[in-house]
Image (cartoon, rainbow, N blue to C red):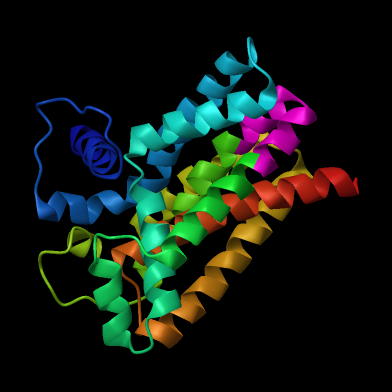
Amino acid sequence: MRYQLELFFTALGFFTRLPVPAWVPWSPERLNHAARYFPLVGWVVGGIGAASFLAFAQVLPPSLAVLLSMAVTIRATGAFHEDGWADACDGLGGGWSKEQVLTIMKDSRIGSYGTVGIVLMLLAKAAALTELAAHGHMLAACALLAAHPLSRLASTSLIHTLEYVREDLSSKSKPLARQLTHVELAIACTFGLLPLALLAPVQGFTALLASAAVTVWAARFFVRRLGGYTGDCLGALQQAAELACYLAIVATWNFI
């Protein structure tokens, strides 16, 4: 149990800017095995987002509470996944060959595709969550609690199924480039899927279906363009799957 707790804190320290206990050892090998707890990190980030939204919504309109909640979660993660989304937009939008795409992705500067992509992504998430909040603050909070773990499970599935395509050992995601064992995948699936119980059955099903559809499409797209995935691809899929969850819940609510 001590080892599993250390792996969780390793994942938490890598994927967020939240402090972890000083007694937790770090090594590339431990990070390698910590991917199983990527969805559990989503519990923490989603919990922070839901709690901050409910707190802000006590004194502010829902739209402002949503924006401030997003700012809090971005601060907690250090815009880790948003950065991956922007880099993926730049690379896949502006690059032709695999080498060009990988070179553009590695550039720390943001280009036109990345700027437009991140602005539209944040606006879409804010609009979807505001729409959910209009139907009830708890609905928006539950959507946050469910979407963050599920979207991180989507990224974890890429690690399990695709090949890591960067050859440079200096890449920050290189230690994660290992297929999960069946036990590790089961742990990730448990933590990724369990929060769906917070939603109504039809909403949970459509959120899962939307996340799965985005994951399958993204995997095929990354394989076609790159032959596999990079760390930026993981961040891009997390953002896309999170948005897909919100949109699915909104669509389901409006339909029923």
* Position of residue 139 in the picture relative to residue 193 (left or right): right
Residue 246 drawn at (x, y percent): 66, 46
Please state the extent of the stretch shown in magenta in the rendering: 127-143
Going by the picture, which residue comes out furthest to the bottom? Answer: 97
Residue at coordinates 34% horizontally, 89% vertically from top-left?
97
Q: Tell me if residue 137 is in the magenta stretch.
A: yes
Residue at coordinates 89% horizontally, 49% vertically from top-left?
255
Residue 155 lies, with reference to residue 256, above or below; the image says below
Residue at coordinates 27% horizontally, 60% vertically from top-left?
109
Between 42 and 230, which is closer to the camera in this rendering?
230
Q: Is residue 173 visible?
A: yes
Q: Is residue 154 visible?
A: no
Residue 184 drawn at (x, y percent): 34, 55
Going by the picture, which residue comes out furthest to the right? Answer: 256
Going by the picture, which residue comes out furthest to the top? Answer: 59
Between 62 and 36, which is closer to the camera in this rendering?
62
Chief secondary structure of the magenta portion: helix
Residue 58 drawn at (x, y percent): 64, 11
